[in-house]
Structures are given as C-alpha cells and as structure tokens.
Image: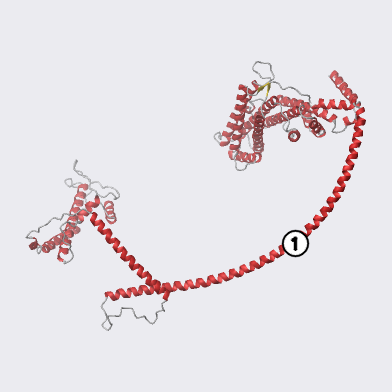
Amino acid sequence: MELRQMEVAQANRHMSLLTAFMPDSFLRPGGDHDCVLVLLLMPRLICKAELIRKQAQEKFELSENCSERPGLRGAAGEQLSFAAGLVYSLSLLQATLHRYEHALSQCSVDVYKKVGSLYPEMSAHERSLDFLIELLHKDQLDETVNVEPLTKAIKYYQHLYSIHLAEQPEDSTMQLADHIKFTQSALDCMGVEVGRLRAFLQGGQEASDIALLLRDLETSCSDIRQFCKKIRRRMPGTDAPGIPAALAFGPQVSDTLLDCRKHLTWVVAVLQEVAAAAAQLIAPLSENEGLPVAALEELAFKASEQIYGSPSSSPYECLRQSCNILISTMNKLATAMQEGEYDAERPPSKPPPVELRAAALRAEITDAEGLGLKLEDRETVIKELKKSLKIKGEELSEANVRLSLLEKKLDSAAKDADERIEKVQAKLEETQALLRKKEKDFEETMDTLQADIDQLEAEKTELKQRLNSQSKRTIEGLRGPLPSGGSPGQAPGSVPGPGLVKDSPLLLQQISAMRLHISQLQHENSILKGAQMKASLAALPPLHVAKLSLPSHEGSGSDLAPGALYRKTSQMLETLNQLSTHTHVVDITRTNPAAKSPSAQLLEQVAQLKSLSDAIEKLKDEVLKETVSQRPGATVPTDFATFPSTAFLRAKEEKQDDTVYMGKVTFSCAAGLGQRHRLVLTQEQLHQLHSRLIF
C-alpha cells in the first residue's frame, strides 16, 4: 500500500512538472486541459459504478431467485428493493458513460473541445458515486440512503449526450453488451418488486387480475433471461470458434434497443411506484393481514397513469404490452445473433480527436516563426474588418433613413385604414338599421297574410258546413214527399235563410269545379269497375246448371211444417226445463258399488248436453228455413247452390289452419274406442268450458 501511495505521489508530481511547461492557453478553463480531464473522467466513473454495483450485489446477495426469499414483506424486502434499484441505476449509468467513451474517441476536434468545456459541470456529478463508495467503506449503505443525486447524474449525462453527441456513431458490440447488462439488472429489479407485491397481497386472491399480472410478469422475466443468455453466448470477447470478432448493425436495430430500454424503464418504474406505495399502506397492518386487490389495483392505475401518461388505458394492458414488446425484441436479437446476421470484423481504428488536437498544439508551439506572419495577417484582417464595418455603418444609416420613411408611410396608411374602417362601420350600421326595418315590415306583412289565411280558413270551414247541410237537405228532400204548398220546380233548401253569409265568387267557382271533377272521377271509376268485373266473370269457367224437379207432395207438406216445428220446439223446451230442474250431481264418494264411475257419469252428462245442443242447432236451421220460406222476397231461388247449415260451417272451421291450440280434455273410455275431436270455440265458449271444468 505504501508503494502504491508513493507511485501515486510520483505520478502527481510528474503531472505538475509537465503542466508547468505548458502555455497558459492549455490550462485555462475550457481548454485542452479540461478536455483531457473529461477523457479521464469517463473511465473513472465507469470503474466507480462497477465497484459500487459489485459491492452492492455481494452485500445484499442479489440473484435471479431473490423474489422467492422469505420476509419480502418487511425490512428484507425494502433492502432487496433498494439494492436492485441501485444496481439497475448503476447499469444504466455505465451504459450511458460507455457511449460517451466511444463517442469521444471518434468525434471531431470541435465536438471534443465543446464537450471538454463542460468538464466542471460533468465532474460535479462524480460526488454522488463518491458518496456511495464512502458509505460502502463505512458499511452504512442501506435502504435509507437517498439515491436522488445518482438519478440526477444519469439524467444529466443522458441529456448532455442527446445535445452534443447524438449524431456520433456507436459501437454495436459495446451497445449490445450494455443492453444485456442493463436488461438483466432491470429483470432483477422487476423480480424483487413482483415478489414484494405478491407478499403484500391478501391471502386467497391468487385468481385475481393483479395476481395473474404478477405471474405473467414473472414468466416474461424468465423468457427474457433465456434470450439474454442466448445472446451472451455469441457475444465477442473470446477466441472460441464460431464467436465473431465484432458486431455491426444498423440504426434501426439501435432504435429498437432504445425503444426496448424505454419500455423496460417504464415497467420497472411502475412496479417500484406500486411497491413503495403498498409498503406504506401495509406498514400498520399485522403479519397475517394483507392488502386487498382493490387497493393494489388503485395504486397500479395511478402509477400507470403517471409513468405511461395515458389515463384511459389500464396497467394490465400497458405492462403486458411492454413485456410483449421486450420479448419480441429480445427474441429477434437472439435469432439474429445465432444466425450470424450481426457478425463483422473489427473496424479500422482512426486517430482519436485528442491525438489530432495534440499534434496541432505541438505544431503551433514549434512554429514560432509563423506566429509573426499570423499576427500580420490578423492585423490586415482587422483593417479590412474596420473598413467593412465603416461601410456597414453607412449602410445602416441609410437603412435607418429608409426605415423612418417607411414608418411615416405606415402611419399614413394606418390612418387611411382607420378612416376606411369608420366608413365601413357606419355603412354597416346603416345596413343593419335598414335590415331591421325590412324585418319589421316583413313581420307586419306576415301577420297580415296570416290573418287573411285565417279568414280564408274560416270561410272554407263555413262553406264546408254549408255544403254538408245543403247535401243533407238535398238527400232529405229526395227521400221525403214534396210539400203540398211548394212548387215542383223549386229544390228543397234552395232558398237562402236570413242567417247565411254571402258566398265568395272564388270559393263558389272552386266548389263547382271540384264537384264536376268528383262526378267525372266517379263516372270513370264506375266504368273501370264494370270493365274489371266483366273481365273477372269472363275468366271464370262456365256454370253447368242442373235442372231440378220438385216432388209433387212438397207443396202439401209445407202446410204441415209449422205445426211439426211447434211440437218440436215445445218438446225441446220441456226437455230443457226438465234438465234444469232435475240437476244430477256426480257422486264421487262411490258409496254404491253398482253405480258407474264419476268420469263415466260426467261423460254421459256431457254427451247428453252435446246431443241437446245438436238438436237445438238443427231445430234453429229448420225454423230459419221455414221463416224465410214464409216471407215473400226473403229467399233467392237457385238451381246451383245450397246454403250451408251452422253445423256444416262449424265443422268447416274446425279444419282451418289459422286456429290456435289451447289445450285438450281427456275422458275415460273402453280400450281401443278412443277418438280425437277438434273443437273450435269462441272466447265465451272457452270461458264457459273452463269454468265448468274447474267448478
């Protein structure tokens, strides 16, 4: 250790003696000395970040199976979450610093000097790493340490790179190696946070959406780890056969890696936010209690809205979509690496900008004689610049004069424009006043026209009433006898009454025209109907009329028919009275063994009622025929048709297909003698049947 300290002291002394020989321009702020310090800063920061990362992994025992450790709900989970997040941040910082290191070895001298001028700002963020190293040395690095300075340093270096070095080409081999390293650190962080959230979850909620999401995230982490292992097997760095010397891919693959890193950062940020908020909620609870699914879902929605910036989408969709993108990207990379799509030879090295700048500085120091010539050239350039400055001053004075003239013209034009605006405004007001006046006249005209329309409607209604009354009077006059005192030439209702209003000539003309048109339409309608009926009759097949001969004794029997009908009616009435007065109640007790069964008795009653109903219908038909035959002019004698009876019509209705099936009634009978009868009932008959079957 003492030898190392002596070597460090000698190196510092050597550097101080060398800088003593350098000119003041080399040591001024933002000069070449700061550029050299920037080149030394990058590997120093990378080394410190690697040291902290390894020490943190050893201290907190980070591995791929951290999520399966017991006690993730308490302090152990907090420590693992802190350690995984710290390693994740350090991996991201190392990837960013590697990009700086490669860009500063390939960029131009101007960009190199511009970045070197920012050394004071860049070196200030080294304190965050020094602070963590000091805590590691004192064994005080735990979850209570604030890592906000480290996060600020990462954001600063990323922002500075995007401004000054974004156009510089990147080393594909280093970029892919940093991506694999960063991805594995992020997967460790995801595994720890998923394990903590599963420990926070209330028991018995394994089938909930949040539990399924955590399970899917674990599966995605496992798949991505496998892809990382496949890619690492083909990474350059060894002389094994089949391993390429270097990698080379286009900007599209680089953009894909950046997009993959962005989605990975979002997923880790959401899980860290949810786990941190859930840890605060579960702190006051006992060991056996857990957080409900609703609470975790609310925290997940808030974190997703904050990180992804999309309030409409759910965290389930966002996280699963990001994991799918990660898996797809890593799968493509692994396939391309195995197929050797990115294999390439080592690119030819070109001199870094620091060497070019050093050569130029040495040339400036050795070329002392050329400095005088350069000074003379500078004086000549200064004189020419003074002359050009004088000419520019004269041109500026002329431009000021022209500007004043233009300002005057602008003022006059503005005044003219104001006057024109005032005139247009006055004309607009006049036009608006005229428009309001015309609108008022229009409204008055509309009111007048509306009044005329109302008056005409009233006259029209009155004329309709008069026309109706006139038509009624005409019809009554045609139906009734003529009055004895009236003359035959005068039509009824033709003399106007004292209360009639004077007819309008225009309305009378319209009424007469309408009557003429209606009569013409009726005449045409009658002609068309007659033609249609003729055509229909002509299309019918011819009738074959059979000549019927009446029996000779039909006329003599007609005198005896009324007496027979009277006797049949009296007998039917007496039968109905007997049936009404001697009602038979069905015996359901079966006290008499010789008596018939209740169903048989009920069937006999129904059959008796049915026979009486058929007899009544038949008697009605006979009475109707006799009544019609006795009334002159009430029958139409025909030789080709017979009027159907009521029974025939009912039987015909029973065979129609438009009836609705309502139910069936079954009566007991002897085996093999059963028959099915279809009955078409009216609504009243259905109600009567229903009431009889129930009561």
Q: Compared with residue 596, is residue 477 higher up or lower down, i.e. above or below?
A: below
Residue occupying image coordinates x 42% and y 76%: 505
Q: What element carries label 1?
A: helix
Choose between 466 and 140: the one closer to the eye.
466
Task: Report the side of 487 relative to 205 (left or right).
Answer: left
Task: Report the side of 665 relative to 383 (left or right).
Answer: left
Residue beneath disc 1 = 416
Snapshot quadrant of residue 668: top left
Q: Can residue 584 be seen in this view?
A: no
Residue 440 in picture, x, y percent from top left: 59, 70
Residue 548 in picture, x, y percent from top left: 11, 57
| Residue farthest to the left, as pictured | 552
Q: Compared with residue 140, is residue 312 higher up or lower down, i.e. above or below?
A: below
Residue 681 in picture, x, y percent from top left: 26, 53
Task: Report the side of 455 relative to 665 (left or right).
Answer: right
Residue 318 in picture, x, y percent from top left: 60, 37
- Report the colour scheme: secondary structure
Q: Give the residue type that dot 1 points to.
A: Asp
Q: Is residue 12 visible?
A: yes
Q: In which quarter of the image is the N terminus?
A: top right
